[in-house]
Image: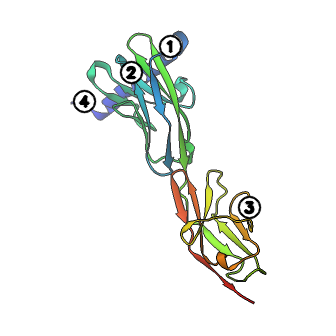
Amino acid sequence: MGSSSGSTHRILVHWQELLLVVSLLNFWSQPTTADLMVESTEALEGTDATLRISYKAHNVSVILWFRGKTTDSTYAIAYLSLKQGSHERGPPGAEGIVEDDGSLLLKNVTMKDAGIYTVMLRLEGCDKIISCGQLDVYQHVSAPTLLASNTTVTENRDSVILTCNTGTESETEFIEWLFNGSAMRYTQRMKMSLDRKKLTIAPFIRWDAGVYQCKASNPVSSAESALVKLDVKFE
């Protein structure tokens, strides 16, 4: 049985040979027209993300993944070799793992992992197939804090300003407003700020009395504020 260091050395040598072949392929070979698709995906920061691929070629010898919209060997991150019916993946310590179906698994992703990834299928001979996909990474949304300028309001005289504090300025964060547990039905007496974090009701009438919440969300995470009850009094 070979030593672990010997196996690691062999994989590293294989990796260096693959990078040399990639450089030669980029210089001499044009991509084929065979179908290859990368499924772009979204992930929550701190979780695993998989960029899945589908292809129709049957003579694939190596699958290589690159960071960015490039096949420059400098940006190569992981490979899967399919020679002689065996699966060999690497290099050791790679930031990604190429799964048996050619998909790229990225563990415990951070915001820095977001971006374009390119896959190259090296076919037997001198042909190659190239495609790319997008990974979007989002932060976990924390529960916002809802504040009211006044919780007991005189009908037809007072106004109320509701402020939803999320603690972030993320452009991917969306704010929704809830009234008595359902989506808010806005009226002409209501004014929303451009970032949707401030809702003004003026004047306040009896039909506005009830329980308010705001909800912050992005494509993979959401959270609601605590309930704020507004009461109306009459003169």
Q: Residues within 10 Å of mark 4 (few under 14, many from 20)?
A: few
Q: CA distance from mark 1 to mark 4?
A: 32 Å
Q: Of tags 2 and 1, which is closer to the observer?
A: 2
Q: Of tags 3 and 4, which is closer to the observer?
A: 3
Q: Position of residue 217 (x, y in %)?
A: 56, 57
Q: Residue at x 51, y 56 (%)?
A: 221
Q: Which of the labelled discs sits on residue 2, or is there none?
A: 4
Q: Are marks 3 and 4 in contact (CB under 8 Å)?
A: no
Q: CA distance from mark 3 to mark 4?
A: 67 Å
Q: CA distance from mark 2 to mark 4?
A: 36 Å
Mark 1, residue position? 24
Q: CA distance from mark 2 to mark 1?
A: 24 Å
Mark 3, residue position? 193
Q: Position of residue 219 (x, y in %)?
A: 54, 50
Q: Earlier in the sequence, mark 3 or mark 4?
A: 4
Which amino acid type is marked by label 4?
Answer: Gly
Q: Position of residue 180 (x, y in %)?
A: 56, 72
Q: CA distance from mark 1 to mark 3?
A: 56 Å
Q: Of tags 2 and 3, which is closer to the observer?
A: 3
Which amino acid type is marked by label 2?
Answer: Lys
Which SS class for mark 4?
Answer: loop
Q: Earlier in the sequence, mark 1 or mark 3?
A: 1
Q: Quadrant of residue 192?
A: bottom right
Q: Residues within 10 Å of mark 2 (few under 14, many from 20)?
A: few
Q: Earlier in the sequence, mark 1 or mark 4?
A: 4
Q: Earlier in the sequence, mark 2 or mark 1?
A: 1
Q: Of tags 1 and 4, which is closer to the observer?
A: 1
Q: Residue at x 72, y 88 (%)?
A: 234
